[in-house]
Image (cartoon, helix red, strand yellow):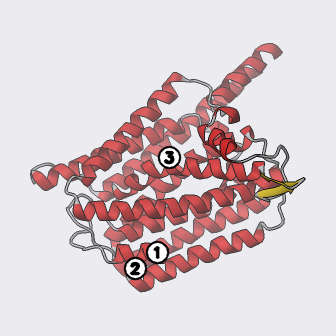
Amino acid sequence: MHLLSHALVAVPATATEPGSGGLTSIGTPALWGATIAVVAGLFIFDFIATRNPHDVSMKEAAGWSAFYIALPLLFGVFVLTQFGSQIGVEYYTGYIVEKSLSVDNLFVFILILSAFAVPRHLQQRALLWGILGALILRGVFIAIGAVAIAQLDFAFLIFGAILIFTAVHLLLEELKGEKKEIHVSELRVVKLVRKVTKVSDDYEGTKFRVTRDGVKYLTPFALVVIVLLFTDVVFAVDSVPAVYGITGDPYLVFATNAFALLGLRALYFLLEGALSKLVHLSYGLSFILAFIGVKLLLHWAHNIWPGVPEIPTLASLFVIIGALAVVTVTSLLSHKRARVAEEDLPAEDVRQATDVERDRT
């Protein structure tokens, strides 16, 4: 983390708005140091709090979720008062984008934990390792992105293309309506790990390795963590370019990613049941990614042809919030209609309708 902050602070700065050909950062060494210290401290606290695995109650999840939402919102007030409204809007917009993407990531986390039949009392510890890995990987991607933006005139063209490709892929997957499931034995990373080392059949708490009859085995818990880490790489590919489409400040990119990830563990248990109701979320995220991708392409084009219009960050904030609000409302209405329809169906038809809805989620 220290090397990351040093590298980003040292990046030449000439502009704040993404796509303007350079980077301006509010991240002084002191601010970087304080932010990384807070993030590291919260992770250490989380690891201490979960040292004795337990089933997370709804009350506990709600409390921690409220804390991890209040923290970045309060930090946004600090950014607004210290650096002005433009930087503040960039921060809040970037945070909303990252938080919405992290909610979508929870769908995949649920599938992974279910596929590996992770005991519920071990799930929060597995998630914590996955989130820590995600933050480290995104830190690497943020540093690479900062250097690319500073050195390559067409960096935002690449970022925009990545986001548009991801948006189209996400939309096509959703339109297919295929059942989303994970088969452990078919995962490439699982096959690779099993070729390298033996894996035991039973969970041994949060242990990564066990020794039986003089033979060392990797535990299923360790295998789950490895799969989560590899999944984090895929998430970072669209997450980091997305927030770089909102702000060209690598410090804000890191801060929004860190705050979005910190509360993911508690949010998982809070939204575990509610996620099945957000049946249109993928459509909204596909639109948001495509919108930011177009925004990046326009910024890149504006640098070459000044007459090309740009999309202001404040307008982006309203579009993103509006998209999330629309898909949330339509999802809840769709879920409600499905429930009402079930009440009028025979028992067998109700079972089939439930299966269809579960397959979609």
Vertical relation: 38 (above or below) 274: below
Q: Nearer the viewer, mark 2 or mark 3?
A: 3
Q: Residue at x 69, y 29 (%)?
A: 358
Residue drawn 64% across and 70% down?
A: 43
Amino acid under disc 1: Val
Q: Residues within 10 Å of mark 2 (few under 14, many from 20)?
A: few
Give the farthest residue toward the front.
214
Counting residues from the start of the chain, the first of labels 2 and 3 encountered is 2
- Above or below, 218 against 341 in this view is below
Please tell me in which quadrant of the rendered image residue 153 appears.
Answer: bottom left
- Residue at 65% x, 32% y: name it: 186
- State the SS at label 2: helix
Q: Position of residue 207 (x, y in %)?
A: 79, 59
Judged from the image, the secondary structure of the residue bearing numbered disc 3 is: helix
Q: Which mark is residue 77?
A: 1
Q: Is residue 271 left or right of residue 84?
A: right
Camera-nearest residue between 206 and 210: 210
Q: Position of residue 337 (x, y in %)?
A: 64, 26
Looking at the rendered structure, the kind of residue marked 2 is Thr
Residue to which mark 3 is pinned: 234
> Where does label 2 land, which residue?
81
Q: Are marks 2 and 1 in contact (CB under 8 Å)?
A: yes
Indicate the amino acid at tag 3. Answer: Val
Disc 3 vs disc 1: Cβ atoms closer than 8 Å? no
3 or 1: mark nearer the eye: 3
To which quarter of the image does residue 50 belong?
bottom right
Tell me, yes or no, if residue 16 can be seen here.
yes
Q: Badge 1: few (under 14), some or many (20 or more) residues near its Cα, within 10 Å?
A: some
- Residue 344 shows in this picture: no
The C terminus sits in image quarter: top right
Query: Do the residues under discs 2 and 3 have CB atoms within 8 angstroms?
Result: no
Q: CA distance from mark 2 to mark 3?
A: 35 Å
